[in-house]
Image: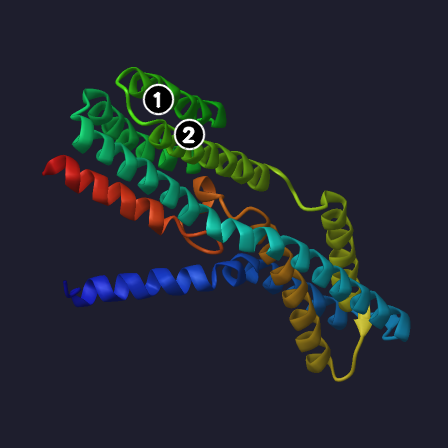
């Protein structure tokens, strides 16, 4: 389906805003620092000279940024796989349940299929923190009632074992996601980075660099890089923060689960 010009402009604007969202956030801070630097220069409050010790402070901050980003990226790469793995488990649950329904004409299988369709909606609610983790875990646990009924109906044990395995995989993925989004990566390192970033910004403001506009440029550039990387690391540290940021920025894509949700909705309509 072709988009009209208004939709194309809206989509392009949304993508551009997401791409530059961090830069937009820190723009007011950079303006403030630039204004302060200007007045400090005008009133001759630049009381420090650029030296090797200050350069070492900047180098240490860059090293700390590299350490933090390497740590959060490992969790982020793992997080990217979680929605696809959840979708795979739910599709397997559906396929095996549908097979049981076709072979046994099982009323329980039909009920379980309906339950799975609702579960996908609950899962999306959980990602957006509209329901708590204990609630989604309870819904996974309630699948046991269907497995008991399958056993009473004489369903082959192999099917039930496969269903239980996918139930276990879903539970593990839910708990892993909860751990990632509720745990900060080395909180004390963030504190040190905040302190060093603040000291560097103050130092660049009161250090005299000639010519002035070159000093102003490097002050804003270094501050921009440190602020940008700090906010990027904080954002990457919680790739499941849909409640605050929606499905934009650095949040992991939920497209596999949304596609399954759409497929279930179409099946229900048909």
Quick one: label 1, few (<14), some, or many (20+) residues within 10 Å? many
Please state which of residues 79 and 30 is positioned toward the viewer in this rendering: 79
Q: In this view, does 213 lie to the left or right of 21?
A: right
Q: Name the residue under label 1.
A: 147
Q: Mark 2 points at which residue?
A: 164
Relative image position of residue 206 (x, y in whole percent): 80, 67
* Residue 258 tag number: none
Q: In this view, does 240 lie to the left or right of 124?
A: right
Relative image position of residue 186 (x, y in whole percent): 72, 46
Q: Do the residues labelled 2 and 1 touch (CB within 8 Å)?
A: yes
Q: Decide: is 192 above or below 266.
A: below
Disc 1 secondary structure class: helix
Q: Is residue 68 left or right of residue 111?
A: right
Q: Quadrant of residue 147?
A: top left
Q: Residue at x 34, y 51 (%)?
A: 255
Disc 2 secondary structure class: helix
Q: Residue at x 82, y 71 (%)?
A: 207
């Amino acid at each position: 389906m072709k988009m009209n010009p208004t939709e194309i402009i809206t989509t392009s604007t949304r993508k551009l805003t997401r791409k530059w969202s961090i830069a937009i956030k820190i723009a007011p801070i950079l303006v403030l620092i630039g204004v302060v630097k200007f007045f400090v220069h005008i009133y001759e409050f630049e009381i420090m000279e650029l030296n090797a010790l200050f350069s070492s402070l900047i180098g240490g901050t860059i090293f700390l940024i590299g350490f933090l980003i390497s740590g959060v990226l490992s969790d982020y790469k793992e997080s990217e796989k979680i929605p696809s793995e959840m979708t795979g488990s739910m599709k397997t649950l559906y396929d095996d349940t549908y097979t049981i329904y076709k072979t046994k004409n099982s009323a329980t299988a039909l009920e379980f299929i309906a339950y799975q369709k609702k579960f996908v909606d609950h899962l999306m609610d959980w990602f957006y923190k509209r329901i708590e983790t204990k609630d989604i875990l309870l819904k996974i646990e309630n699948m046991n009632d269907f497995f008991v009924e399958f056993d009473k109906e004489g369903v082959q044990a192999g099917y039930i074992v496969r269903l239980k395995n996918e139930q276990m995989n879903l539970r593990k993925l839910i708990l892993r996601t909860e751990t990632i989004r509720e745990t900060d990566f080395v909180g004390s390192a963030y504190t040190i980075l905040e302190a060093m970033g603040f000291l560097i910004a103050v130092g660049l403001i009161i250090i005299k660099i000639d010519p002035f506009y070159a000093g102003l440029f490097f002050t804003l550039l270094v501050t921009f890089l440190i602020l940008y990387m700090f906010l990027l690391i904080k954002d990457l540290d919680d790739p499941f923060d849909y409640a605050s940021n929606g499905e934009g920025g650095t949040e992991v894509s939920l497209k596999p689960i949304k596609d399954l949700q759409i497929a279930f909705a179409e099946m229900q309509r048909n």
